Amino acid sequence: MKNENLYNYILGIADNSLILGQRMGELCGHGPSLETDIACTNISLDLFGQVRSYFQYAGKIAGDGRTEDDIAMLRKEREYKNVLLVEQPNTNFAYSIGRQFLFDVYHLAFLEQLQKSTDLTLSAIANKCIKEVSYHERFSSDWVKRFGDGTEESKAKMQEAINDLWTYTDELFHQTEADKAMVAEGIGVDVTKLKEAYYKNVGELLEESTLEIPESKWFQKGGKNGVHTEHLGYLLSDLQYMQRAYPNMEW
Amino acid sequence: MVKEKQNIDKKLIPILEAVSDPEIPVLSIMDMGVVRSAIIVDELVKVEITPTYSGCPAMDVIGDDIKKALKEAGYNSEIDLILHPAWTTDWITPRGRKALEDYGIAAPLDAEADKDVLLNGKRIVKCTNCSSQNTRLVSQFGSTACKAQFQCDDCQEPFDYFKCLK
């Protein structure tokens, strides 16, 4: 492929939204209340919409007739480039909210920079997505506050979720080969530069929520290079089931 | 590249105005502001539409409905989805805003007011049933991606508010 770095770069961005969208979609009909159920699936829908824009563009770049559906449904586990954070399961609602919040703060900062990309398609997608993601961030940070500053039990659960998910945050700021190549061309975002503000913003909200900022300095990584936690395989078997069972089926 | 202004062939306007938003049937896609251009090139109508939200499932239907309406008027057409410039609620026409209100969906306020409503719980969104401003946000996410849920504390009516998007 001529533009392999750009292709891989787009997949790196889009896979985060795809996998997180699938996780939030799992809550459809299972949310703790009707309003939160609808909110989670709305977020899922936004993320899937964003994924379509990215994958349609990636398909064009690949130039071999592969479609958005092929890219979403027909890769193997090791070919998905999402960060480990977004594939973590919906252990309880505090985990779903914690995962969303830790990703949203990053996602907003990332899209802000991607709007400045010299690639006009990527900057247009970023410009569109950022408006939606700012709603996601409001929703997730509101719930972190409500749980943290809520009852003894909600606080304990929120703290446990943040502590567990914390180990997956550092990976957000690792650069892949495709990242480095795209940053050099002015197309990509230098994620290493987002790290300081990220931990500052997240820390401030945790403090406001009367939660402790985890002290652990040990971080897990691998997702960006296709080395995932055991949870992704199960998620993909759900996500890919229809295309695997009935190849080329259309909606 | 930037097409803030619409570019629509006058002959096509009545045809496009007859196409409605599948999720808000009282609203024409023209009043919604999603049609950015429609021009006739060698007997083929080229239409550009832009999504309200990335994941809006109505976009595919809107594309199909435009094709059908143009076909009935004797035109073949080609629909392109464009993302730039991104759609904003400012593109909803005054007639569109009125249609929303009449249908029971509160029309978007401006961006600053929106922030006040959604973040600080300021009571300025008017109830679509009794016009009281004694309303409160139930959820930032509603029945479709573009709406939030509200309730009126005077008449108790639950209603949708069309979120401001800029």
Image: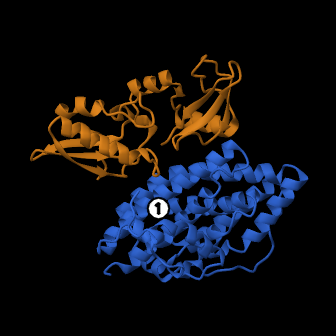
Q: Residue at x 14, y 37 (%)?
A: B74
* Residue A178 at x, y percent in the picture: 45, 79
Q: Is residue A93 above or below residue A170?
A: above
Residue at image point 67% right, 58% down: A101
Residue A169: give x, y in percent of width and height. 67, 71
Tell me if residue A210 comes above or below residue A168 in the rendering: above
In this picture, residue A66 sits left or right of residue A234: left
Is A24 left, or right, of A65 in this rendering? right
Amino acid type shown at disc 1: Val
Colour given to chain B in the rendered image: orange
Assign a secondary structure to mark 1.
Answer: helix
Residue at the image point whose x is 69% and y is 37% from the top: B120
Is A141 displayed left or right of A23 in the figure? right
Instruction: Tell me: residue A179, above or below residue A242.
Output: below
Q: Which residue is mark 1?
A: A51
Nearer to me, B52 or A141: B52
Please identify which colour was used for chain A in the image: blue
Can residue B134 be seen from the camera position used here?
yes
Residue occupying the point 72% across, 74% down: A167
Name of the residue lying farthest toward the left: B42
Q: Is residue A117 visible?
A: no
